[in-house]
Image (tube, grey):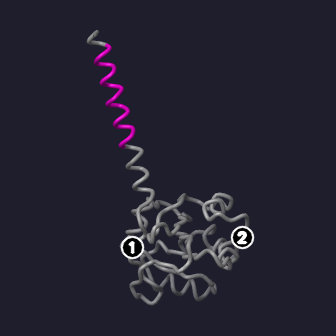
Amino acid sequence: MNVTKMFKGRMQNLFLGLASLFVITMVANASEPLAQKLVDLNGKTVVLDSAKSKMLVVFWATWCPDCREKLSDELVKLNKNPDVDLVAISTESDGEKVKKFVEGEKIQLRVLRDPEKELRKQLKVTSVPHWAVYSRLDGAWKVVDSAPAFEKDRVLKALGLAKF
């Protein structure tokens, strides 16, 4: 056998092995369970959980016009769906500012904060709004989809819904 052909064959096997490892790593990271501890508006530590089978987590900030619009319109409508639990997570460190904003704007959603940035790091949240849909699989929460911005159709698809 020609040495060049043997070398090419081994390189192809190495490449396929590395590509497979990359795909397995990406799938494993995409399905990490939801186990972060967050803080409610009163400063109490809570573990994000739900009795429902799907959960939409939306990251937002008080200074973000698109976030404010979603918090008072589309997300309120979606929150009425009996199969979906919606949680709005503020990315801001000033808990008192967030609490005053929520009360002043009469936000009718469950609002939490991620002061240690654990969930933001897991989902690689670098901008707001950013959303993630979780589904309960085998007793644990797994990420179905996650993305920056708020593409209504993509969110609905991830939730398995036709409309709000």
Residue extending farthest top: 2
Q: Residue 115 at x, y = what percent?
A: 39, 75
The N terminus, quarter of image: top left
Q: Residue 145 at x, y = what percent?
A: 54, 59
- Disc marking residue 109: none
Residue extending farthest left: 3
Labels in figure, total: 2
- Given residues 3 and 106, the one toward you in this image is 3
Q: Which amino acid does label 1 sit on?
A: Gln
User: Does residue 23 show up magenta in the picture?
Assistant: no
Q: What residue type is labelled 2?
A: Phe
Q: Which quarter of the figure has residue 29? A: bottom left
Helix, strand or loop status at disc 2: loop
Boundaries of the magenta span? 5-21
Q: Looking at the image, which residue is at 33% across and 21% down?
A: 9
Q: Residue tagged by mark 1?
A: 36
Instruction: From the image, give the main secondary structure of the stretch colored magenta.
Output: helix
Give the vertical position of 104 relative to 63 (above or below).
Answer: below
Question: In the figure, is residue 8 to the left or right of 157?
Answer: left
Q: Looking at the image, which residue is at 36% across and 73% down?
A: 116
Residue extending farthest right: 163
- Given residues 10 and 81, the one toward you in this image is 10
- Disc marking residue 164: 2
Residues under numbered marks 1 and 2 in contact, where contact means CB atoms less than 8 Å apart: no
Question: In the figure, is residue 163 to the left or right of 116?
Answer: right
